[in-house]
Image (spheres, rainbow, N blue to C red):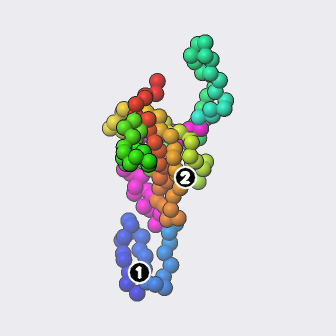
Amino acid sequence: MAKLTNILGGISMGVSKYSQINFEKISAEMGWVSERWFNGTISIVDPNLDSIVWDEWTNTSTGSETVLWTGAARIQPVGADTDNNAGRAVLGSRRVRFQVPRDDTRVFVRKGLSVRVVDGGQFADLEKLDFTVSAAINSSYAWLLTIECEADIKSELD
């Protein structure tokens, strides 16, 4: 049986149809290696739209959103949204991928939650945008949690 040694920072695993692959150990090591490249900070937020009360006379709202998780992240634009019917790019919307550490204490990230960029790393303008979660389903062999969002790039947060 052939062995690959010192792969994945010291983990050695057999390459054979008879050997078991330790996905947990590999994921833990590769997650840590990947996290070294995170240079942003995000918060995953439940906007609690039902609890926000709009005052039409003062043009203000009262109530608050709930921060579900805050931590380090990688922020990567992945393309413009497209109009599925016409096949054209929607100019005011952009798809963005956030990668965050695997964290068993974090709540399930579902469609409709928001992501707020607390620290945009080398691009502080990211802190001015509102990102809406469109998906956060990962593979069974995940090193990180990948959160897909849409950003309305025509409007900025206050």
- The residue tagged 1 is 15
Q: Secondary structure at mark 1?
A: strand
Q: Secondary structure at mark 2?
A: loop
Tell me what residue is drawn at x 44 percent, y 35 percent: 152
| Residue 3 on the magenta span | no
Give the residue furthest to the right.
Answer: 51
Give the residue furthest to the top.
Answer: 57
Tell me what residue is drawn at x 46 percent, y 27 percent: 157
Give the residue furthest to the front.
Answer: 86
The answer to whether 53 appears left or right of 121 in the picture is right
Whether residue 134 is visible to the viewer of this picture, yes or no, is yes
Amino acid at pointer 1? Val
Please report the bounds of the magenta region as a residue range.
25-46
- Total marks drawn? 2
Place residue 11 in its image quadrant: bottom left
Label disc, if present, on residue 103 of the rendered structure: 2
Whether residue 73 is visible to the viewer of this picture, yes or no, is no
Residue 134 x %, y %:
51, 46
Q: Which one is nearer the viewer's eye here, 143 or 96?
A: 96
Q: Is residue 4 shown above or below 31?
A: below
Q: Is residue 23 shown above or below 16?
A: above
